């Protein structure tokens, strides 16, 4: 009888464990990449698998700036693909045109930004950037 109860307890625990949703990495937060002549910042908010946020890109030692100045305005939105990546549509404030990017989680404090479809016209957002999470 003991073995029977133990067996059923194990089967039930496997059933519940497999039916529980897996926790996804949360991309929310401020992410930054800086060099001597440039800075790229993403401010991301994740809720129910959706991503919204804004960007600020300062390039060419400050000669070119592609930023959303109004903090309430969103320049990017998208969805979580899996525990390690998201696809976002973003809008360049410089040209007003949209593009598509993939953000890949490297680890809990580092992400990789890659533009998949460039915006038409002039824009000053890096095509590729490694960003670290600001604390």
Image (spheres, helix red, strand yellow):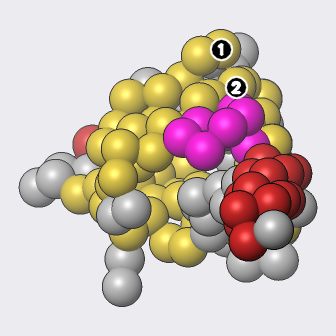
Magenta-colored segment: predominant secondary structure: strand
Question: Horizontal placement of 100 versus 41: left or right?
Answer: right
Q: Secondary structure at mark 1?
A: strand
Asked whether the viewer can see residue 63, the reply is no
Residue 96 got which mark?
A: none
Q: Which residues are magenta?
A: 80-87
Marks 1 and 2, how far apart at CA: 5 Å
Place of residue 94 in the rendered image (x, y in percent of width and height, measured from the top left): 64, 41
Asked whether the viewer can see residue 27, the reply is yes
Question: Horizontal placement of 104 versus 94: left or right?
Answer: left
Q: Sequence-wise, which precedes: disc 1 or disc 2? A: 2
Give whichever of 93, 90 is nearer the camera.
90
Disc 2 target residue: 100
Asked whether 128 falls inside the magenta stretch, the response is no
Which quarter of the rendering shows the C terminus? bottom left
Label 1 with label 2: CB-CB less than 8 Å: yes
Residue 117 got which mark?
A: 1
Q: Callout 2: 10 Å neighbours few (<14), some, many (20+)?
A: some
């Amino acid at each position: 009888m003991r073995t029977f109860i133990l067996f059923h307890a194990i089967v039930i625990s496997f059933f519940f464990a497999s039916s529980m949703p897996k926790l996804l990495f949360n991309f929310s937060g401020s992410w930054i990449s800086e060099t001597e002549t440039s800075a790229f910042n993403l401010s991301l908010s994740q809720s129910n698998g959706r991503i919204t946020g804004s960007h600020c890109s300062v390039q060419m030692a400050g000669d070119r700036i592609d930023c959303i100045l109004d903090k309430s305005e969103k320049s990017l939105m998208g969805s979580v693909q899996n525990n390690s990546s998201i696809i976002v549509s973003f809008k360049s404030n410089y040209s007003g045109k949209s593009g598509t990017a993939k953000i890949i989680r490297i680890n809990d404090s580092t992400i990789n930004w890659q533009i998949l479809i460039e915006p038409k016209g002039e824009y000053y957002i890096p095509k590729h950037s490694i960003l670290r999470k600001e604390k």
